[in-house]
Image (cartoon, rainbow, N blue to C red):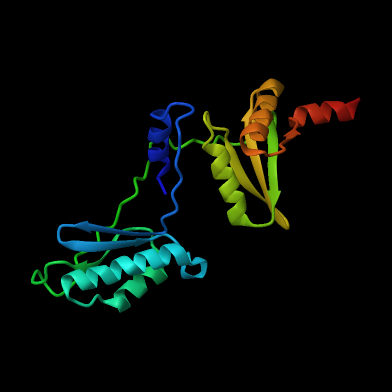
Amino acid sequence: RLFPEDIKKLYDNTPVKTPVLIINQPYLLGQREGWIYLAVHVSPEALDEVEFDKMYKKLKNIEKETGRLLDWARIKQVIAEARGIPVPIFEISPGNGNGYVEILEVRHPVDLYGKPEVPDLRPEAWSILAAEVEDEIEAKRLSAIINHQGPPIPARVIKNEPGYRVIAGPFNDLKEANEAIKRLKIDLEMDGKLIEPVRKRQSRGRR
């Protein structure tokens, strides 16, 4: 749930073997400037009953402590939209207006800091077939994962009826391509296949 440029900052400032704790919190409640905010990171179809019950109990406690009813229609809307950003749902101290506070849209920068640049494939260079999948979204996901290796391995999605190919490269020579295949296997458990330069295939055909 980070922008690529923020991932790079985290990566650059996190030593190898740093212990990591992964926490599943699809529903988050927070307070700021007299308002209760709710952030939902999971769609209703993927409802986490345990975490949902925890969130529901916290909301009921807010009603009990303030002596006022929450706008449950508003809360239901936030859960249904699952936007992944904090949305104001309750004013702790009434009297500052009947409407909800304005939601500030987060503007994503046009040029991402640390965004890997993917060079065009060159017929005369080595490349790798990293994956073949039927779903375009899955292909884009795999391509993004490969692109954000450290150091990055350039990759892109190419339409290949009836599915999609994830192609990594270009690489300057066979050694560089083999190193990338090794990293894909070790880091991502992908079995990459070499794609030879066009000139090599043509020279073999003349023989």
Which residue is painted at 54% across and 38% down in the image?
147
Instruction: Locate residue 160, reporting x and y percent.
Output: 71, 52
Which residue is painted at 75% across and 31% down in the image?
196
Q: Is residue 48 left or right of residue 155?
A: left
In front of the other: 169 or 203: 169
Extreme-right residue of the structure: 207
Instruction: Locate residue 91, reporting x and y percent.
Output: 17, 68
Instruction: Locate residue 136, reporting x and y percent.
Output: 61, 55
Height in image: 71 above or below 132? below
Q: Is residue 94 left or right of residue 82?
A: left
Instruction: Determine the image quadrant of residue 72.
Output: bottom left
Height in image: 172 above or below 105? above
Extreme-left residue of the structure: 95
- How many marks on residues? 0
The answer to whether one can see residue 15 in this image is yes
Q: Quadrant of the C terminus?
A: top right
Q: Is residue 6 left or right of residue 63?
A: right
Instruction: Determine the image quadrant of residue 121.
Output: top right
